[in-house]
């Protein structure tokens, strides 16, 4: 008998190397083969993206804008998936040899003693029982670690979304946006979860369930499906210059509800009742977690933005655009890392960091850096987004544990439809009671239609595919994303025509003044915030014409004012690539000084990835 | 008795988790802790870089340019290293538990069966016997995988170096640059290797060697020390506007010799005589490897550049700068990946890709994309470079197996001095026999002095620190890099004054014409190349005023001409951030059409990271 602390290891596979002396050379060769395969995988991705770019160009060149580049990326990805699945035969190579070892626990790092040499192994994650049988090695190797999405690909996408939130319209519709994003997303996710639970009950009656599917799984599914995607529809909106308020509502909602979906889904996963029944205490703990993580991420993200604003205000880094851009990038990335190091959600922190950077720091940057930061994050966003959508196409075929069930898929479509209905229409009705400028029913129909699912839903569903329920969710999610991107994305232009939504809106100052008088979100907390922001935060954190000393005349306020506004030699506002002038609500409402409209520059370009394309072609 | 194929595993550490049901939760917690630690490590790096940026700004602000930012990055890195080494006490956490397992071989992936659940582990590398005893866990965790340097950090640095090679002066001095970079580097590395072997023999006589140190180790050390760094000195050169030919010689040499050093060092590692004596056959095999890898990387890199040039020439991607920039980035990155997948050297391929992109593709890009690509790679280069130099500072203290030997270090300084002497002076003498404009002895002294060692030497030396010899080399390399960056880097300005080198050189057309007549490298292969490039390659690959039909009037040539030169609405050459106009040798020598000097735009800004800083401050 082996004592505890001593367990046995079995080799499941025939080892090629026998002699001890050869071990080193063989292991080097293996590491090399593995590195070559990783390079080849990334190369496939890079070539896919390049192909997508060329095709997108030829589409744009022929003025075909019905299908967004993300849709194309998915098609190319699917083709590669098909080739990987059916075209490539696996060869058993020396690098594929996998030892199976039985231990009592799974430490993060494992040191293996091979004939006196020690090799370190790191935990990659749990694998399914069937996976280590070495079939379809190539498919398995073509699989990226799901955490790559959360740690590398999503942050730039979400940061860019925050950074390019159309400031004025966003803040003017803040109340409505927050309602849709928080209350609406919660409603949608619970409705979806409930409908799915009904569906699961029916399936289990029909005997179609081959594994466990708990109520919490349904709620989790509801949470991940509630994240609507800002990419596809809004690119089209932007190209067509759709009504700015509709744009702001949809964009604001889809950006913020990503954050809600992440935190909500992780709170649901953390909900672990001690028994199998529903428990109030665990529920409260989950709710606490939700609020804690959300507010923590919010505070951290905003704090990082404020710190960057102060750094850029009180140094003359703006004289060196490269340093300034690098600092901006590093501070934003640090936000993500700090949040992850503190066990709160980096992606959510990065979103609020992006919003704060756009609202304050952006105004302190040099003209050069404004352009550089925008272009840098635009590029990162473009690459990350298209990579995710290509990869979705690949996994449609390369994922080896798909569970497609027609009842479940139909149920899911019904569920997201009902969830969206329960989000948009009742909330719009309630919001219209308070709004000076009501959200018309045509707008509501478009918002209903434009609730695509995209990168965030995919990333949340691929994160864990260990159980039967999760596998089925993942497969269904892929179908939903494909359907909504192709059908709803492609149908946006006809939908806008059908709903008679005005396009080609060019905003002018007159329009602004008119809109300002009939302010939209007139609830007092927002008014209060606008005043506070305009009178204290903006003067404190940015170079502005409306210095802190206007509001309070303490010596501290004087010392916090910078002289840059006086000796500033470059005009920040003129070079922004946007002809819609951007002014903050409260500044506008101070009708007395409409003359300095253009002095308050904000990140005004509402682009989500394709706006830059049009500047040259027109 | 256990049969073969069955080996035993021993737990070396007390495991916290006992029950099987807890395994999953514990492993999740461990993965989380590990992720948090990774985030914290990256956060440290990001904060270090931010601090460096702020300090660099305050230095520049006060016009102190004696110390380059890389020097500062090293200082900050050292401080962090000291804190890690002496300030942080390791806490034994659940995540640190390392199982030691005895196997017969070390596969790339290992599947561990823990109570019926399977976990996959991937090979991280060989560790030293003492390392798994869990001492100094934090120091070990703060160590990045050396392959990160080769796969993530070096490619953008090297690409940027190639992309910003000062075209005209580079090509005009091509013969001399190639001589220094190839012949000179080979001489330097063998001289250094021989001197080090002498030093090792003396040390072994003195009984100061605690392990093996073979002749091939000495040659390897010579090879890695022969890579001079373009960063520090040239930033100063650029700021001071030092003589352009001196600049081109030094920059061209230091960029190309990085490639030589990589390929040479890997060929020396591959040199494995069957006995212990010197063997002709193995030597020839190594030489073949050297030539094969070098020419393969050269061909692959150039081919990728040419492909990108054709893509950008024959599509109107230039209408969409975002797509164009993304394609440019992806194609350049693909070069690296393809080279790695083919087992040739990605970093070298990327260098030639960068040169080709600058020479051809750059001319096809839209004005917007020219700026974007330059700024993007400038930023990536800045971040990667400063990260490497910070990390050097960290490893000076955090690396746990330093072998500092005063005799070896003194020997190494003598060796690199002699190696550089044997490179510069004899070669310059020979080159001056053929050059119309000889390299003055003052230039030679500056070239001698400016042979700093930097990122490449560090990356090559940290790649493998498994043996005693490699450890000693690594420690010595750190000392050499620190010394050369601080002393030689800091002493550049006084050196230039001492040598009476002209600074503040602003080139004008008159000067160009004069220089053109007295062409420098008049060897026939270069003349032939200039002609071929100008008459066939440039017209084929770029939009140019000198179309292919001028040289040959076939229908094919006509179809390869694009109409862009005619209907081109934006002038490429004017917006480049450089007031030194750049014209190719052969175009200049065609004195008849000096009028279109500014139409042949090249990547003309010779900046290596700090030139942008000055544009605003002046």
Image (spheres, coloured by chain):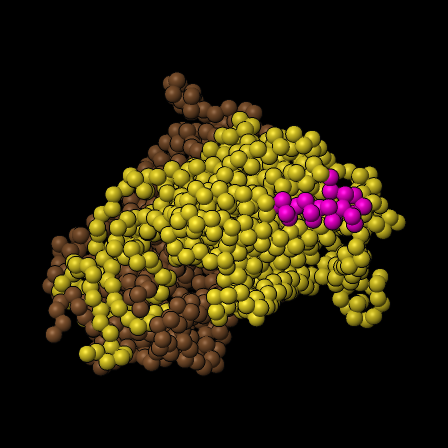
Chain colours: A yellow, B brown
Q: Is residue A436 magenta?
A: yes
Residue that appears at 56% across and 40% down: A232
Q: Quadrant of residue A424?
A: top right
- Magenta segment boundaries in residue numbering: A420-440
Quadrant of the drawing holding the C terminus of chain A: top right
User: Which residue occupies 54% across, 43% down?
Assistant: A414
Residue B509 is left or right of residue A535, and the answer is left
Residue B91 is at least partly visible in this image: yes
Magenta stretch contains residue B504: no
| Residue furthest right in the image | A592
Q: Nearer the viewer, residue B326 or A242?
A: A242
Q: Residue B303: horizontal and vertical position, in percent? A: 36, 38
Q: Is residue B326 above or below residue A175?
A: above
Q: Is residue A128 above or below residue B604?
A: below
Q: Quadrant of residue A130?
A: bottom left
Q: x%, y% of residue B434? A: 34, 44
Q: Position of residue A283 (x, y in %)?
A: 57, 66
Residue name at image x 84 percent, y 66 percent: A552
Residue ID at (29%, 45%):
B295
The answer to whether A474 appears left or right of B200 in the picture is right
């Amino acid at each position: 008998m082996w004592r505890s602390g001593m367990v046995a290891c079995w080799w499941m596979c025939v080892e090629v190397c026998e002699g001890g002396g050869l071990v080193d050379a063989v292991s080097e060769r293996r590491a090399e083969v593995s590195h070559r395969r990783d390079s080849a995988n990334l190369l496939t991705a890079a070539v896919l993206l390049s192909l997508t770019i060329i095709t997108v160009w030829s589409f744009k060149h022929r003025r075909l804008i019905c299908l967004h580049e993300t849709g194309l990326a998915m098609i190319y990805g699917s083709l590669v998936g098909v080739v990987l699945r059916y075209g490539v035969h696996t060869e058993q190579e020396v690098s594929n040899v996998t030892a199976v070892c039985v231990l009592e626990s799974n430490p993060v790092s494992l040191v293996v003693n091979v004939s006196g040499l020690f090799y370190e192994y790191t935990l990659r994650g749990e694998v399914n029982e069937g996976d280590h049988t070495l079939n379809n090695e190539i498919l398995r190797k073509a699989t990226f670690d799901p955490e790559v999405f959360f740690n590398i690909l999503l942050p730039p996408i979400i940061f860019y979304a925050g950074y390019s939130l159309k400031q004025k319209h966003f803040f003017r519709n803040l109340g409505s946006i927050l309602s849709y994003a928080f209350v609406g997303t919660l409603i949608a996710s619970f409705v979806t979860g409930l409908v799915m639970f009904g569906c699961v009950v029916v399936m289990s009656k029909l005997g179609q369930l081959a594994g466990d599917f708990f109520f919490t799984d349904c709620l989790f599914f509801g949470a991940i499906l509630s994240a609507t995607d800002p990419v596809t529809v809004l690119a089209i909106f932007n190209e067509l210059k759709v009504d700015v308020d509709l744009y702001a509502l949809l964009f604001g909602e889809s950006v913020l509800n990503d954050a809600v979906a992440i935190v909500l889904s992780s709170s649901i996963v953390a909900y672990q009742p001690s028994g199998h029944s529903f428990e109030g205490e665990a529920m409260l703990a989950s709710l606490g977690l939700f609020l804690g993580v959300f507010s923590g991420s919010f505070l951290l993200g905003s704090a990082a933005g404020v710190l960057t604003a102060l750094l850029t205000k009180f140094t003359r880094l703006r004289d060196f655009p490269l340093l300034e851009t690098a600092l901006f990038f590093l501070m934003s990335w640090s936000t993500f890392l700090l949040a992850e190091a503190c066990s709160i959600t980096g992606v959510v922190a990065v979103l609020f960091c992006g919003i704060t950077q756009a609202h304050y720091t952006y105004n302190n940057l040099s003209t050069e850096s404004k352009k550089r930061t925008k272009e840098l994050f635009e590029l990162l966003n473009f690459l990350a987004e298209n990579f995710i959508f290509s990869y979705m196409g690949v996994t449609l075929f390369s994922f080896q544990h798909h569970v497609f069930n027609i009842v479940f898929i139909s149920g899911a479509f019904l569920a997201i439809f009902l969830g969206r209905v329960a989000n948009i229409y009742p909330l719009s009705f309630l919001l219209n009671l308070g709004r000076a400028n009501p959200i018309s029913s045509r707008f509501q129909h478009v918002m209903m239609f434009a609730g695509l699912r995209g990168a965030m839903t995919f990333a949340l569903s691929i994160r864990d595919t260990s159980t039967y329920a999760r596998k089925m969710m993942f497969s269904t999610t892929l179908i939903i994303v494909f359907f909504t991107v192709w059908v709803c994305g492609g149908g946006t232009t006809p939908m806008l025509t059908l709903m008679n939504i005005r396009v080609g809106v060019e905003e002018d100052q007159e329009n602004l003044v008119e809109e300002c008088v009939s302010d939209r979100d007139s609830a007092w907390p927002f008014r209060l915030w606008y005043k506070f922001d305009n009178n204290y935060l903006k003067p404190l954190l940015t170079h502005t014409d409306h210095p802190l000393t206007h509001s309070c005349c303490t010596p501290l306020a004087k010392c916090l004012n910078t002289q840059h506004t006086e000796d500033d030699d470059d005009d920040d506002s003129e070079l922004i690539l946007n002809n819609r002038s951007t002014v903050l609500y409260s500044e506008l409402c101070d009708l007395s000084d409409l003359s300095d409209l253009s002095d308050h520059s904000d990140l005004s370009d509402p682009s989500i990835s394709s706006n830059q394309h049009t500047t040259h072609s027109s």
